[in-house]
Image (spheres, grey):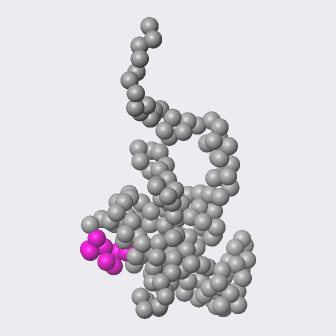
Amino acid sequence: MIDGAYVRGAARRSRQLGLMRVAGPDGPGEQIQTLRLALRFRPHLATKRFKLSDVMGDYTPAPKLDACVAEWIEQAATQLCGPLDAVNCLINPAMVLMGGRLPGRLVEQLADRTNALLRDHAGQLPTLAPVARAALSEDAPAVGAAILPFSHFLLPKPGALWKAPTGGVIEDTA
């Protein structure tokens, strides 16, 4: 965001932090992958013979499932630290908001663990923005889809008040 307007960037990918490259969960010696691949929750559950539906909706606590989720949260928070260090140094945000399709309680647990890991090396960074769950994290896809018609048809485009230079002399027609 620049002056309240969303800026897409030169290749229209300014918000796609999931494409940042990170080391594998076993460290830099393992094949480097994108953050999006590193944070995949469903495959992690499948390795322990759980389904995504086991943690969605009406969740019933179960020790083995809770241990599986805690393991993923630890891995995901560790993988997030590198990219968030970069975001803090390059962009200097006031806060980093997390959202997505996971239940809010899991996003909050991930944000809490990420904050704890970031605080461990906060002295090495010039500034550190807290990580928090976005208020609309679970509903963001639906809200985003609902706002598209309004955004497209009713709101002015960010560059609507700017005119490109014509390169010529403006003639007085009076």
Image: magenta residue range: 118-125
- State the residue lying farthest toward the front: 168
Q: Quadrant of residue 119?
A: bottom left
The residue closer to the viewer here, 162 or 155, is 162
Q: On screen, 30 above or below 11? A: below
Q: How many tags in the picture?
A: 0
Q: Residue at x 38, y 57 (%)?
A: 94
Residue 173: x %, y % from top left: 45, 11
Report the side of 77 relative to 104 (left or right). Answer: left
Report the side of 74 relative to 122 (left or right). Answer: right
Report the side of 102 relative to 110 (left or right). Answer: right
Q: Residue at x 45, y 79 (%)?
A: 22
Q: Is residue 59 visible?
A: no
Q: Is residue 65 visible?
A: yes
Q: Is residue 120 magenta?
A: yes
Which SS type dominates the magenta stretch? helix
Residue 60: x %, y % from top left: 70, 79
